[in-house]
Image (spheres, rainbow, N blue to C red):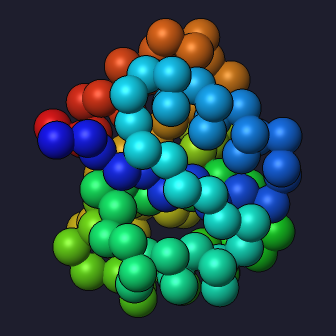
Amino acid sequence: MTKTILIVDEHWDVLETLETLLKKNGYKVLTAKNLGDCLEKIKKTKPNLLLIGYIATKGAILDVATKINGLKIAYLVTDKSEEDYLNLYANVVGFINQTKDINEVLLKIGELLK
């Protein structure tokens, strides 16, 4: 069964890059440019994994985690300092360093979807 990944990020280039990469690797990919759009898509599609990238307000990111139960959430981070702040909720299953080699990013996503 094909796994569905929803990516939310305010940078369209990140969305397009990840969408292309993940589709080429057999995933169904949905994208959202803001948290409101993200929450609507979660209700309608029930993805297997939510990847949260850059959102201007960190409080809004945590707000998503409090509104979602049973959905695995992984954050796209650029450094370790972000992990402590975001690792507050049970459904946060991991962090993906988006500056790593693309094969490492794919491996981490695969691990999180098991």
Q: Quadrant of residue 78?
A: top right
Q: Residue at x 16, y 41 (%)?
A: 1
Check the picture and name the quadrant holding the C terminus: top left
What x and y, as percent, mark residue 23?
Answer: 50, 31
Determine whether, in the image, residue 104 is placed left or right of residue 18: left
The residue located at (71%, 46%) in the rendering is: 15
Q: Is residue 71 visible?
A: yes
Picture quarter containing residue 30?
Answer: bottom right
State the residue in front, 58 or 28.
28
Query: Where 78 falls versus 68 (above or below)?
Result: above
Asked whether 59 or 72 is in front, the reply is 72
Relative depth, front residue between 110 and 44: 44
Up the image or down, 33 lies above or below 21; here it is below
Q: Position of residue 16 (x, y in %)?
A: 74, 40
Residue 2: x percent and y percent? Answer: 26, 41
**Residue at point 51%, 22% (across, down):** 24
Residue 71's quadrant in the figure?
bottom left
Where's residue 17, x and y in %? 72, 32
From the viewer's perspective, is 41 left or right of 1?
A: right
